[in-house]
Image: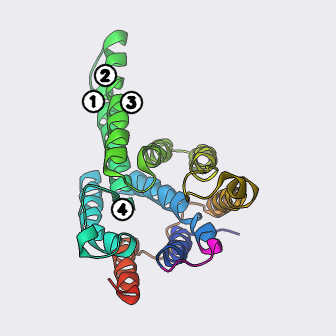
Amino acid sequence: MQITAFFVKLIAIVTMIIDHFGAVFAMPIYFRVIGRIAFPLFVFLIAEGCKYTKSMEKYILRLGIFALVSEVPFDLAFRGGISGIDFLNNTNIFYTLWLGVVCVYVLQKVKKFAQDKQYANRAYMLLWLIVPIFVYGAMLAADWLGTDYGGVGVLFVFLTAAVAQFEELEVAKAMQMLIIAIFVFILYFNSFILDIPIEYWINITAVQFLLAGLSTLIIIALYKGKQGYAVKWLFYVVYPVHLLAFALTRGI
């Protein structure tokens, strides 16, 4: 069985909507468990976008625009009311994705510059130090902005997209799956995410979150690099629209 990028995107969007519905309307924890599938899949899709886009500059611009556009419905849905709108605190997932992709862009530029010039070994090593310094700065910025998944999320995006640059699809995908497994454990097997008493979390919720996150590895393993239906704007549009719909339904 093989699945396309379109199908992966569809699963990510549906599970994201279920997650946000559960959060906005205080539904049972199982809505949030299902939602743990979404973020690893979106990170994987962003990595594919970085690999295949014709213009990283336009890709970055698009993510940045939707980060700003989505912040109002995001705050209305999760912070309640016009007074909760804040573009610099507790920001939406597009901020995280944007920072991660900018880090990938820096990596690509450093790599290209290094290949075009002749450097002594010491100078070559100093050049590559730019990348980890920039990534660390982006992680700090994410934590300062309070983005979804914070600095860890930015590092997750960067590493997943960085290894996607390998030409051999199966090698790249194997490395991505390893990174996803590690970060799923870091992100979801944690007693602080939902502020639930640690005894309950360890016994029930953490295991459920972890298994839901790891289930994304099966989906990614079935992906063979085919695009399927071209719906580039689907996630960009669905994200702010469904959050605004939830906020209006609940009452701003």
Measured from the top left, where is residue 183 in percent x and y? 57, 46
Mark nearer the N terminus (3 vs 1): 1
Task: Give the label, 3 or 2, closer to the camera.
Answer: 3
Mark 1 and mark 2 in contact? Answer it, CB < 8 Å: yes
Q: Amino acid at mark 4?
A: Asn
Residue drawn at point x = 63 percent, y = 59 percent: 213
User: Distance between the Cα atoms at labels 4 and 1?
Assistant: 33 Å
Nearer the observer, disc 4 or disc 3?
4
Residue topped by disc 1: 113
Q: Is residue 146 left or right of residue 65?
A: right
Amino acid type assigned to the residue bearing label 2 in the image: Leu
| CA–CA distance in space, label 4 to label 3 | 24 Å
Q: Over which residues does the magenta segment extend? A: 25-31
Q: Amino acid at mark 3?
A: Pro
Q: Mark 4 or mark 1: which is in front? A: 4
Name of the residue lying farthest toward the bottom: 249
Residue 92's disc number: 4
Q: Are marks 4 and 3 in contact (CB under 8 Å)?
A: no
Return the x and y of residue 166 as percentages of the image width and height.
50, 42
Secondary structure at badge 1 equals helix
Pair 1/2: label in front: 2
| Amino acid type, label 1 | Phe
Image quadrant where one finds the N terminus: bottom right
**Location of residue 238 (image quadrant):** bottom left
Determine whether 199 is above or below 130 in the image.
below
100, above or below 20, in the image = above
Q: CA distance from mark 3 to mark 2?
A: 11 Å
Q: Residue at x 24, y 71 (%)?
A: 83
| Residue for badge 3 | 132
Task: Report the residue at 56% width, 57% height from top.
Answer: 195
To which quarter of the image does residue 193 belong? bottom right
